[in-house]
Image (spheres, grey):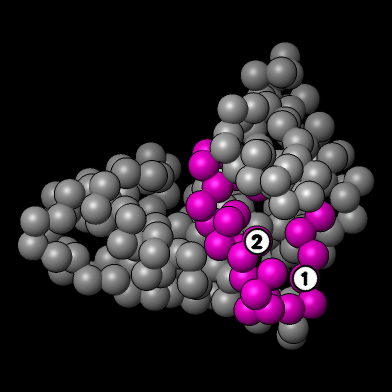
């Protein structure tokens, strides 16, 4: 499940193709944003691509129900949130307990929770003056970035970093490696 460009999705696709992730098939990519480039990445790799947007439903409950219905039709073992900026419905969290994982661009519990996504995470890390940041893969629970941590990888903050430069380094050195490793571990356990 994705909302934007899909760089983490591409890391997963490549890791499956390269045999870094085994015992895994990506059956679909769902985005809440019809303009998400991640949907193109999915199509370009022969993966079913779907947009399920809260904007298409009269209420949040109707959207939550539709999202859960579509996921249930896919009959999946694991749901991977790879930059999905929508809160997962509680009914889905309960039904897929310990089968939904998320990647977050910080070392949780730092710079996480409501309002910490995308560049905002890296802006906050730079404002605080931390010397190390990174990424975390965790199980999704009812809270925001509060689920049990699966894996973390640290990334050094360098003098002169901008939020954009730091974001790119965290993606390259941590997110794109950690998320495929976590998926492979789960797929083979």
**Quadrant (top left/top right/bottom left/bottom right) for the C terminus:** bottom right
Q: Quadrant of residue 79?
A: bottom right
Measure how far apart labels 1 and 2 are at the Cα level. Answer: 10 Å
Looking at the image, which residue sits at the far bottom?
A: 189
93 above or below 48?
below
Q: Which residues are magenta?
A: 1-27
Number of callouts: 2
User: x%, y% of residue 19?
Assistant: 68, 78
The residue sitting at 40% across, 45% down in the picture is: 117
Q: Is residue 33 above or below residue 118?
A: above
| Residue 121 seen by the camera | yes
Q: Position of residue 161 (x, y in %)?
A: 15, 55
Work out whether residue 125 or residue 22 is closer to the camera in this orientation and state it. Answer: 22
**Quarter of image, res 9:** bottom right
Q: Residue at x 80, y 44 (%)?
A: 48
Number of other residues with Cα within 10 Å of mark 1, as a class: few under 14, some 14 to 19, many 20 or more? some
The residue identified by callout 2 is 13
Q: Nearer the viewer, residue 140 or 183?
A: 183
Q: Are marks 1 and 2 in contact (CB under 8 Å)?
A: no
């Amino acid at each position: 499940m994705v909302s934007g460009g899909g760089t983490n999705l591409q890391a997963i696709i490549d890791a499956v193709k390269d045999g870094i992730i085994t015992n895994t098939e990506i059956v679909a990519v769902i985005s809440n944003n019809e303009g998400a480039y991640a949907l193109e990445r999915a199509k370009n790799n022969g993966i079913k691509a779907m947009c399920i947007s809260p904007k298409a439903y009269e209420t949040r409950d109707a959207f939550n129900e539709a999202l859960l219905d579509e996921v249930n039709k896919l009959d999946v073992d694991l749901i991977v949130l790879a930059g999905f900026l929508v809160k997962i419905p509680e009914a889905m969290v309960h039904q897929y307990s310990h089968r939904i994982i998320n990647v977050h661009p910080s070392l949780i519990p730092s710079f996480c929770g409501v309002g910490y996504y995308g560049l905002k995470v890296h802006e906050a890390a730079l404002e605080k003056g931390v010397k190390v940041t990174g990424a975390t893969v965790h199980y999704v629970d009812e809270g925001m970035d509060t689920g049990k941590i699966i894996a973390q990888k640290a990334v050094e903050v360098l003098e002169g970093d901008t939020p954009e430069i730091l974001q790119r380094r965290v993606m390259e050195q941590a997110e794109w490696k950690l998320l495929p490793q976590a998926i492979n571990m789960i797929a083979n356990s």
